[in-house]
Image (spheres, rainbow, N blue to C red):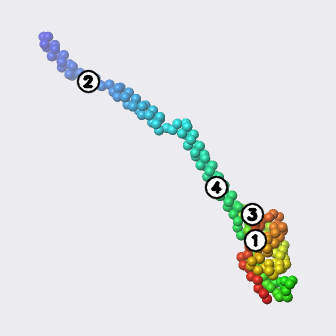
Amino acid sequence: MADENNTDDKPELEDAPAKPRSNTSLIVLFVGMVVVLETGMFFFLVPSAEQVSALAEAELIQSVQEGAEKAEQEQSDENQEIEFDLGAFGETFSPIETERSFRVELKLYGLIRKKNRDKMTKEFDAKNGRLRHAIRMKIRNSELNELTENQLGLLQRRILTTCNHLLDEDLLLGVGFHEFQLIEE
C-alpha cells in the first residue's frame, strides 16, 4: 500500500496545472536598460549649458552681421549716385572778342544721390525756369576758349555752383554733358 500511495501521488503532480513563470526579472531588466540608455544619451548627446550658450552666441553674432550687411547695402543703395536730366540747351551767342556767331548745343545731367531723387524732382519742377535761365546765362557769358573740349571743366563748375545756389540744399554732386557741340555759324 505504501507503493500505491507513492504512485497515486505522482499522477497528481503531473496532472496539476503548471505555475506560471514569473517575468518580473525580465521587466526589471528591460526598465533598467531603458533608464541606462536614456541616461547615456542625456550625457553624450544633449549639449551642455556652455555649448548651448556658445551656439546661441554664434547665431546672434551671425544675425547681427547679416543685419549690418543688409543695413550697409541699403545705405550704399541710398548713397548711390544717379543721373538726373537737367535738360537740353541750344544757345547762340557772339563772344566779346570776336564778330562771329557760335551755337552751343548740349544735353546736361546732374549727379545726385538716389535717396534725394524725389526731393530733386520736386525742386527742379518748382524752379525749372530759374535753373534753365541761370544755365543759359553761364553758357552765354563763357568765353570761346572755355567752350572748347579741354576747358569744359570750368563751365561745369560754374553751372554746378549756380544750380546748387538756386536749390534749397546742395543736392547736385556734379554736372556733366550727355552731348556737347560748339558750332560756328
Q: Which mark is residue 90?
A: none
Q: Is residue 78 left or right of residue 17?
A: right
Q: Viewer-nearest of labels 1 and 3?
A: 1
Any part of residue 86 in sight = no
Residue 95 drawn above or below residue 159: below
Quote the CA–CA distance across marks 1 and 3: 15 Å
SS for callout 3: helix
Quarter that holds the N terminus: top left
What residue is disc 3 on? 116
Residue 77 drawn above or below residue 86: above
Q: Are marks 1 and 3 in contact (CB under 8 Å)?
A: no
Q: Within 10 angstroms of label 2, few (less than 14), some, or many (20 or more) residues?
A: few
Question: Which kind of residue does numbered mark 2 sit on?
Answer: Ala
Number of callouts:
4
Residue 116 drawn above or below residue 36: below
Give percent across and percent down for residue 153: 77, 73
Q: Are marks 4 and 3 in contact (CB under 8 Å)?
A: no
Residue shown at 76%/83% (left/top)?
182
Instruction: Identify the image quadrant of residue 38.
Output: top left
SS for callout 2: loop
Q: Within 10 angstroms of label 3, few (less than 14), some, or many (20 or more) residues?
A: some
Question: Which kind of residue does numbered mark 4 sit on?
Answer: Lys
What residue is disc 4 on? 70
Q: Within 10 angstroms of label 4, few (less than 14), some, or many (20 or more) residues?
A: few
Q: Viewer-nearest of labels 3 and 2?
A: 3
What residue is disc 1 on? 175
Q: Are marks 2 and 4 in contact (CB under 8 Å)?
A: no
Instruction: Identify the image quadrant of residue 32.
Output: top left
SS for callout 1: strand
